[in-house]
Image (cartoon, rainbow, N blue to C red):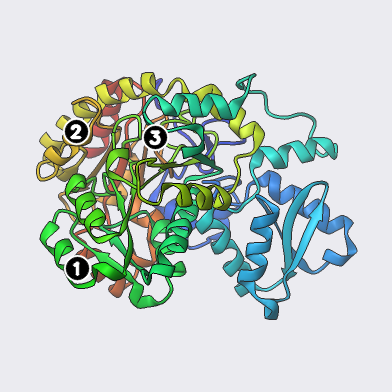
Amino acid sequence: MSSTCFPHLPLGQTIPASPHAVSCSLPTMRSVRGYEEKDPEIVRQLTNGYPRFVVHPYARKLAAHFIASTPALFGRTLWLTSSAAMARALTAYLGATRKPELYTSHGLYGVSHPEHADTFTLAKTFLQNIGGFLSSREAEDHLVALKLLSAPHPEDVFKGDASAEIRRQLRAVLPGTTDADLIIANCGMSAMHAAFRAVAAVQAPRGRTVWLQLGWLYLDTISILKQFTAQPADYVYVRDVLDLAALARIFAAHGTRIAGVVAEVPTNPLIQTPDLAAIATLCRSHGARLLVDPSVSSIFSLNVLPHADLVVSSLTKYTASEGDLTAGLVAVNPAGPDAAALRTATAAGVEPLYARDAARLAWQVGKTPAVLTQINASTPQVVAFLEKHPAVKEVFWALQPGSRENYLKLARSPDATGGMITFTLRQPGALDKFYDQLRLPKGPSFGMKTTLICPYMYLAHYDLVTTPAGLAELAASKLDPDLLRLCVGIEPAAEIISALGEALG
């Protein structure tokens, strides 16, 4: 049976149909593996992708133009960055031995270095981890100015003060905050990096350098913690988010050295919600700062600010629900003990949101509650179907047993679940057949009007699903390598269920 809701999306098709889309179609497991393994046959069809992982075609075209027209750049790789500060940070990170050089032209900033595979990988990973790539809309504007593109992609935007409108909408769900407490970034990882560095800067002079990762976090958050803690022993992974006793023991033994705790609420991808009030009490009583990321369900669904020192969220998810831009937020709890210092340091550390991205986000942000209402109405129906299906082994979502009560203590309403569902299949080796037959849009990201599914561990942690040591690490964290991450969109629940039912058999 075909569906008007879910037409076939060929490999590389942008999701949505915009040059600024944050997702793209990976319709088969072969395409997923080919993308991860850099198979030329697959990669050449993937012109776009999630903006922090893939240099946008417009940015590539612009860099190629500058290289071709600048003799000093011949034989060098050029990275166009989100700001002059990011270019300086990348230069420092690469170090003098790799011969990076700052680049500026037409109000743009970047870094060039001699063509070298290792340097390329280092630079790309650094910019990916903390959101340092040039915005696709900024690249587009420069291509138009250089007459290399005829006109910008037509789209609806907010006509007034975009930053003021975004903050006005956010204050509605973050009461007590002022505009200065709401720090907007070009993506969620820029927000997380700036928040982490701000807390580290405040805490290090107090002899506090240890960071606790509470549960499995999003891969680039893990990378930030591992890469920027003072020494390897300062990074501590607490596997079980529900084991308060274990957390209390760590604080009892090392509380005076702990700078901060980073928690996703709920976690990604097992969607577990810890007892946030109890964790906040532990942190406050021991002088640690608590960073809470509610992106999985959205700040519009969960009230976490009273428990956190900093709320760090991706606004790409749910708030930019069209799926055509990245943005991030750090909300400073004005009642927190270091609020003034954290506000100043975080604001100085984020990468700015480009003006046209802000105008597009401001046009979308006011629609967030209505979009979430539709998503929240469908999600329990999809969960009920999956839980009853004999081919499905486990289902994880915001109201799962074990952490349901913790979630409901934070939820703005009992049905404010967000759209994320993860699940595993009962039959070993069933992933490829199910995924390939499924008619739903398949690609990275979540929190869009469009339903999206992906084999999460393959896209986020391919190194772990393909090595014995990696599989052991996943097992220790109770993560099935074949786990599927589904985020419900605004399409009719019956259509989503129908598509799942066909593929599950």
Q: How far is the residue under mark 2 from the one under mark 3?
A: 16 Å
* Residue shown at the point (74%, 54%) measured from the top left: 109
Q: Nearer the viewer, residue 83 or 387?
A: 83
Q: Nearer the viewer, mark 1 or mark 3?
A: 1
User: Is residue 473 left or right of 139 when viewed as pictured?
Assistant: left
* Vertical side of 55 occupied by 180: above or below: above
Q: How far is the residue under mark 1 from the one under mark 2?
A: 36 Å
- Residue 369 spot, x, y in % from top left: 37, 21
Q: Amino acid at mark 3?
A: Gly
User: The residue tagged with tag 1: helix, strand or loop?
Assistant: helix
Q: How far is the residue under mark 1 from the one under mark 3?
A: 34 Å
* Residue shown at the point (22%, 35%) measured from the top left: 410
Quadrant into which the C terminus falls: top left
User: Is residue 267 left or right of 143 when viewed as pictured?
Assistant: left
- Where is mark 1, residue-wise? 250
Q: Earlier in the sequence, mark 2 or mark 3?
A: 2
User: The residue tagged with tag 3: helix, strand or loop?
Assistant: loop
* Vertical side of 92 occupied by 320: above or below: above
User: The residue tagged with tag 2: helix, strand or loop?
Assistant: helix
- Residue 203 spot, x, y in % from top left: 40, 63
User: Is residue 2 left or right of 388 when viewed as pictured?
Assistant: right
- Where is mark 3, residue-wise? 447
Q: Amino acid at mark 1?
A: Ile
- Where is mark 2, residue-wise? 383
> In this orientation, does residue 471 appear?
no
Quadrant into which the N terminus falls: top left
